[in-house]
Image (tube, grey):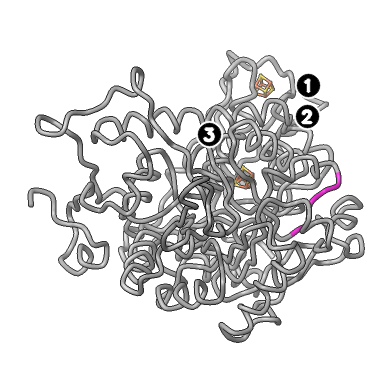
Amino acid sequence: MKTYLPAKFMVERDPERCIQCQVCVNQCTFDVHRHDPDQEMVRSGEENCVGCHRCAIFCPTRALAIKRNPLDYRENYNWRPEVIEDIIKQAETGGVLLTGMGDDKSQRIYWDHLLLNASQVTNPSIDPLREPMELVTYLGQKPERVEVERHSLSLKTKIAPQVKLEVPVMFSAMSYGAVSLNVHESLARAAAEAGTLWNTGEGGLHPSLYKYGGNTIVQVASGRFGVHSEYLDAARVIEIKIGQGAKPGIGGHLPGEKVSAEVSMTRMIPQWTDALSPAPQHDIYSIEDLAQLVYALKEATDYAKPVSVKIAAVHNSAAIASGMVRAGADIIVLDGLRGATGAAPKVIRDNVGIPIELALASVDSRLMQEGMRNRASIVVSGGIRNSGDLAKAIALGADAVYIGTAALVALGCTLCQQCHTGKCAWGICTTDLALTKRVNPDIGARRLANLLRGWSLELKDILGGMGVNAVESLRGNRLHLRGVGLTDTELEILGVRMAGS
Ligand code: SF4
Ligand code: SF4
């Protein structure tokens, strides 16, 4: 069937610069460039171009430019080009539209409507270059009060297992199979270097990465892929995954063509078969069921590790989070509307869930009101883009954040949203061995560790500017935030005052 879809991008090759080296032919995974042996020329067929920019970046002479195709539809605010193109795709395929990464719609980004405070006269700022600035964060259940033995000064109160983070940023769940082993190794090594944690996602832990167990969060999801006692024992934290922001309420699907020998061994499933995670956790149909699973995992690991529970941010997140804390979760993870994925139905990704900022504020407020805020740490994910978002998330009540998309961008991802195709030109979201080599774990770990270092330095600058010397002093301190361009209702939910007041 002839496609009615126009090319989204134009590929311009400067003939003065092009040396016919064929680098672009080899780098492109979408067959945009090809070598014509008769003419001894490289040619481009732009209809396949997804705008990943791999060719333009690797072209040794900078001969390529990728531009949006200016061919546009007649202006119509209701029937935008993307809406028309989705209909055309479904008319041609008759299927569910799949996509990768996170929601790219113009939903309100509340981080951009929140501003941080800074000291001026009465409360002097602190220079982080000259004075110590504490970013260390401990995740886990905290006691209401601490009792100390009067004479020996030893602790009488039994403290639940705590996890120390040198910086309140962790790498969020990305499963082996959705991303390559080299990506997992890069994340694990960067987490170890930065003193933080990375997360296996729901695809198990490859044997070569067990040595990073002290910096690893292992997931127990509905498919239970790769879950066994050594896997639980190796981890620093165990995370029960109930939902994720990119696809709340639906299961996961790793296509069979990505289930290579190594992926199948790690996930404990047959090679080249689809890995389907059911939509619900079949162990969990109530808070009581969740409590049973939390305690089963704690029992299995001798109560030595915090258990985290991850949900997608949805309308009643605050009530659910309250139940999760009562069920014994040491860490609750909220994944917002803009959270990314390797593959999700586009209609779910773009229309289901709520922004993480609103979910975070409402969960933090609810746990405060119920006097339970100390009983679990809150970790948020789904759209944390930089250290400014990080600082605002902490001020809104988060103990730490997860980053996924930002970490992949650090590895080269250009958000082309083709993760579900398995053809990632950057070698990230693929298990094709020819492509996975494009992420070198030495370089990947360095880039990720650099990102965390940069954010840490910036966070110290932000804290110093506010006149506080510890991230602990910012946590949940919404007086350090002001809102701009928000309605009274939005300000009320966020628990922040209007700028100027
Ligand atoms: S990589 Fe650049 S120089 Fe080499 S063939 Fe492609 S456009 Fe020409
Ligand atoms: S991971 Fe790869 S396929 Fe996915 S958005 Fe990034 S560059 Fe594109």
C-alpha gap between disc 1 and disc 2? 6 Å
Residue hosting label 1: 40
Mark 3: which amino acid?
Ile
* Mark 2 vs mark 3, CA separation in Å: 21 Å
Q: Nearer the viewer, mark 1 or mark 3?
A: 3
Tags 1 and 3 touching, CB below 8 Å: no
327 in relation to 79, above or below = below
Three-letter amino acid code at the position of disc 2: Asp
Specify few, some or many for label 3: CA neighbours under 10 Å numbering under 14, 14-19, or 20 or more: some
Magenta residues? 203-207
Ligand 1: image quarter: top right
Residue 3 drawn in magenta: no
> Does residue 249 lie above or below 422 as drawn?
below
Which residue type does callout 1 highlight? Glu
Q: How many marks?
A: 3
Instruction: Note whether ligand 1 is within 8 Å of mark 2.
Output: no
Is the stretch drawn in magenta largely helix, strand or loop?
loop
Residue 76 appears anywhere in the view: yes
Q: Is residue 204 magenta?
A: yes
Marks 1 & 2, CB-CB < 8 Å contact: yes
- Residues 58 and 498: in front is 498
Q: Which residue is mark 2?
A: 36
Q: Quadrant of the N terminus?
A: bottom right
Mark found first going from the N terminus, 1 or 3: 1
Q: Position of residue 252 (x, y in %)?
A: 68, 68
Q: Dot 2: few (<14), some (14–19), or many (≥20) neighbours within 10 Å?
A: few
CA neighbours of label 1 inside 10 A, class few (<14), some (14 to 19), many (20+): few
Between 257 and 66, the one nearer to me in the picture:
257
Which of the two discs, 2 and 3, labels the residue nearer the N terminus?
2
Q: Residue at x 63, y 38 (%)?
A: 191
Q: Which residue is mark 3?
A: 66
In the image, residue 464 sits, relative to residue 317, either above or below, namely above
